[in-house]
């Protein structure tokens, strides 16, 4: 959803948009567990990238997630 912040993918910390792209592309065709901060609640979402590594979303902007 708009405003979600990707915290981690399969327990790999995501600090930059490139991290999410790299992890997702390397896992084409395999199910991944995304943890996202959605309005200050951590949600777990299962995502299965297509065979070419796409998941059907775009990254508009992203700040490093900091656990306070």
Image (tube, rainbow, N blue to C red):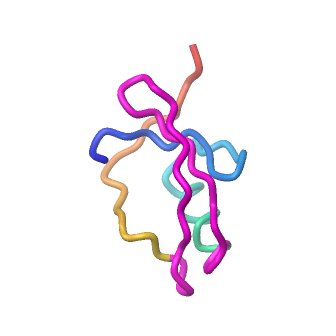
Q: Quadrant of residue 55?
A: bottom left
Residue extending farthest to the left is: 2
Q: Is residue 6 above or below residue 26?
A: above
Q: Percent x, y for residue 24?
A: 59, 66
Q: Is residue 27 above or below residue 44?
A: below
The residue closer to the viewer here, 67 or 51, is 51
Residue extending farthest to the bottom is: 51
Magenta stretch encompasses residue 39: yes
Question: Which residue is located at x 41 percent, y 43 percent?
Answer: 62
Please give left or right for residue 26 compared with residue 52 in the image. right
Q: Which residues are magenta?
A: 27-53
Question: Which residue is located at x 37 percent, y 56 percent?
Answer: 59
Q: Percent x, y for residue 5?
A: 43, 39
Q: Percent x, y for residue 63?
A: 44, 36
Q: Is residue 39 above or below residue 5?
A: above
The quadrant of the picture occupied by the C terminus is top right
Question: Which residue is located at x 30 percent, y 39 percent?
Answer: 3
The residue closer to the viewer here, 19 or 57, is 57
Q: What is the total number of numbered labels drawn onto the structure image?
A: 0
Question: Which residue is located at x 57 percent, y 50 percent?
Answer: 34
The residue closer to the viewer here, 53 or 30, is 30
Residue extending farthest to the top is: 68
Magenta stretch encompasses residue 36: yes
Q: Percent x, y for residue 23?
A: 64, 63
Please give left or right for residue 11 compared with residue 41 in the image. right
């Amino acid at each position: 959803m708009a405003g979600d912040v990707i915290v981690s993918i399969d327990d790999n910390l995501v600090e930059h948009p490139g991290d999410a792209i790299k992890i997702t592309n390397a896992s084409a065709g395999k199910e991944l567990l995304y943890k996202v901060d959605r309005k200050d609640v951590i949600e777990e979402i299962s995502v299965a990238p297509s065979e070419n590594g796409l998941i059907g979303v775009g990254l508009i902007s992203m700040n490093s997630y900091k656990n306070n």
